[in-house]
Amino acid sequence: MEFYNILIDWYLQNKRDLPWRNTTNPYHIWLSEIMLQQTRVAQGMPYYYSFTKEFPTVFDLANATEEKVLKLWQGLGYYSRARNLHKTAQYISNELNGIFPPSYKELLQLSGVGEYTAAAIASFSYNEVVPVVDGNVFRVLSRYFDIESDISQPATKKEFTALAQELIPKDNPAIFNQAIMEFGAMQCVPKNPVCSVCVFNGSCFALQKNKVALLPVKSKKLKITNRFFNYLVLEDVLGNTVIQKRTSKGIWHNLYEFPLLETTEIADFNFVSKAVQDAFFSQYKINSIEECSDATLIHKLSHQHLHIQFWKIKIKDQIENGINKQDLKTFPFPIVIHNFIEKM
């Protein structure tokens, strides 16, 4: 009870005024929770406003094209979230008459909704007594109670969920879930938390044992794969170009890109030039090939580092069904290609 009272007092004095906290509408809460997966609040906020303005109801989202949804999502990353969002909106709209499932167990059946998101919607919209357990909650509880269990292990998730279930009040689970997540996001942060001003500095076991920087324990590390992308930006005599849709499974599924030459290492001019003339654009009369060196970059994803080079290829011909620069900006692209187009 002491933990709960101190936490709630802190929350009521320090909580951020976030739009999804001012509603119990499950559609708005679902949108915010999907957007904030792997995303900071400051980054996700503009997207939340854009989506609720463009798609004020789940029916509006369901009736939109996938390309429109992906275009609005552009730059937020983890695009499978947007595709699942659209798919789930269609299911809720068409199969459930626009009504969200009213319980944790039923919410778990929705595409793209895991245990954390289902718990958030269930508690915030329906006041169901189910705890949320995300990275913030792992951090707060592991430090306060000095728990050294490895959070990368599935059994640990059950351990922390059981502990949170003991702490959560039966009469107001929503405020407890909001409070503990906010405390982890603002006070008990991953690196260099200011424990001297923490409301728990008299009872936190990790602080007493000088273990704050060591918790939570997470041993599993992602294996990073390096990939090398060479984007071939064709430009004809009218200034038109060509793009393609990424239909294969993997990163950026159903987004657009320029023709791609993927290599095993950073490619030089001679290698790219030969590939362009022999395999990619042999049907055209090449005028010039130039590396856009100012656009070369490394784009870091959670499990991949993409080494990206852009090559501008001017031809003497006219591309059949070529895309002009104005229409080009209407397609959904990965943010690195969108940024290149904006500078082009």
Image: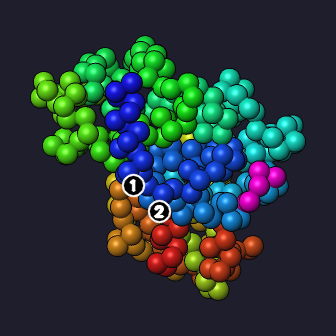
Which segment is the magenta one?
A: 55-59
Say left or right for 190 vs 59.
left
Between the C-alphas of marks 1 and 2, the distance is 8 Å
| Foreground of the two, 238 or 248 | 248
| Kind of residue at badge 2 | Val
Circle nearer the N terminus (1, 2): 1
Q: Residue at x 87, y 42 (%)?
A: 97
Q: Give the amino acid type for the residue marked by disc 1 in the picture.
A: His
Pointer 2 residue? 336
Q: Are marks 1 and 2 in contact (CB under 8 Å)?
A: yes
The part of the image, by quadrant, that contains residue 120 is top right
x then y, percent, for residue 82: 63, 49
- Nearer the observer, 287 or 145: 145
What sort of colour scheme is used for the picture? Answer: rainbow
Q: Is residue 82 left or right of residue 6?
A: right
Query: Residue drawn at (47%, 34%), measured in percent from left and top?
Result: 176
